[in-house]
Image (spheres, helix red, strand yellow):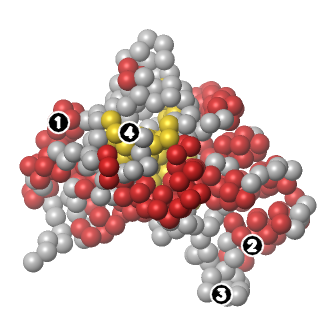
Amino acid sequence: MTQIYFNEERLSLDDFASLCAQTLHRQDFPLARAAEKNVLIYHRDDLLTAAKTDRQNTLAELHRALSSGPGVFAVQGLYDDLAAIDRSSNLFEAILASEAANGGGGDHFAKAGSNGRIWNALQKVAERDAEAFVEYYSNPLLALICEAWVGPGYEITAQVNQVRPGGKAQQPHRDYHLGFQLNEVVARFPLPLQILSQYLTLQGAVAHSDMPIASGPTQLLPWSQQYAEGYLAWRDPRFIAFFQQHAVQLPLKKGDGLFFNPALFHAAGNNVTGDHIRTANLLQVSSSFGKTMEKVNHVKVLEAIYPALLGKKLSAAQLQAVVAASGEGYSFPTNLDTDPPLGGLVPKTQQQLVLEALQQDCPAEEFNARLAEHERKREA
């Protein structure tokens, strides 16, 4: 009989170690340029070229890398325009300084104040500099990677993490959803639901600085996402010790990306440099079937960036990418009395609304009115 519910007493370090002992076979992932320490290394140009030829096969390989593969891959040159990275980095510094003056915020899995953290960086950047937002999120490769794991209609949140010289490593952990829950809560979920939760979120990090090993790039334990009971295991001292003995790190260059299954055991590393600040924009991409960790005010984001979109010449892929990052792409929940389905089974989404407005060259004031009416209709 299949075991449906588990508790800590049933955890097996031997089973976990056996899964983590797998070896990556490079030939199973032909689009990758290399494999280092059981982490797949892709390059921006290779993925974009492959996607033009066979998009579905490219999506499938990236999905396999995160599921049946090692659970993590890096993308060299995810951003080839480093000016877009630097522009956002300057905004991050201004936001960090402003928030530090007002008391700052806490961090997950690390001592409060030891790192710099910006919650809801996506919305804060959009409101401060719409052009910077558009430059950053009009990245077709980022959109491709998001879709590979969570499918279309996803929603992005972003949190900046800065590990300063002397900053200590995080506790190894799994991520949202169940990675944020206490074990007594996790144990109440049937194991198939625990396994399902990892397919609802993609974890990503964009390097906003070079990340040599000494600066503490993310510690990773390839294959650990395959341990079904892992949401109950990551606090266990035996599993923490195993992680500390076997975790790997890869250096990244500014503009590179790192993406992993949220069930992968991971942790920010120690920054043992004397003067190097390691900054990453952490992306959490949620399936339309799930809920994001943060509440982003997409109305404010769209009002902020719409004038910039009106005057911006973007390719169709770039436009789709930035709209996917800025507006809701899922029709529910809504009030079906006032927001009934039109021409199908679902009401119009924010993403459809903004694309229609741009196609019609709708003035910003009129678009804002349409957006307000759209929101009003969705309220109960």
Q: CA distance from mark 1 to mark 2?
A: 51 Å
Q: Pointer 4: what residue?
A: 34
In 3D space, how far apart are the residues under numbered discs 3 and 2 (Cα atoms)? Answer: 17 Å
Which of marks 4 and 2 precedes in the sequence? Answer: 4
Q: Which mark is residue 344?
A: 3
Q: Kindly identify the residue that appears in the image at 15 percent across and 60 percent down.
A: 7
Q: Secondary structure at mark 3?
A: loop
Residue identified by numbered label 2: 374
Residue pointed to by mark 1 = 241
Q: Confirm or deny contact between disc 4 and disc 1 (CB under 8 A).
A: no
4 vs 1, front mark: 4
Q: Any mark on residue 84, and which? A: none
- The three-letter amino acid code for the residue at tag 1 is Ala
Left or right, residue 196 beside residue 188: right
- Using the image, determine if residue 292 lies above or below residue 255: below
Q: Residues within 10 Å of mark 4 (few under 14, many from 20)?
A: some
Label 1 element class: helix
Identify the residue shown where x is 77% and y is 52%.
Answer: 314
How far, Cα to Cα, is label 4 from label 1?
29 Å
Tell me whether circle 2 and circle 4 mark residues in contact (CB < 8 Å).
no
The foreground one among 380 and 303 is 303
Q: Nearer the viewer, mark 3 or mark 4?
A: 4
**Mark 1 to mark 3 CA distance (whole Å):** 53 Å
Disc 3 from disc 4: Cα separation:
45 Å
Q: Position of residue 269 (x, y in %)?
A: 35, 29
Instruction: Work out whether residue 14 can be spotted.
Output: yes
Mark 2 surroundings: few (<14), some (14-19) or many (≥20) residues within 10 A: some
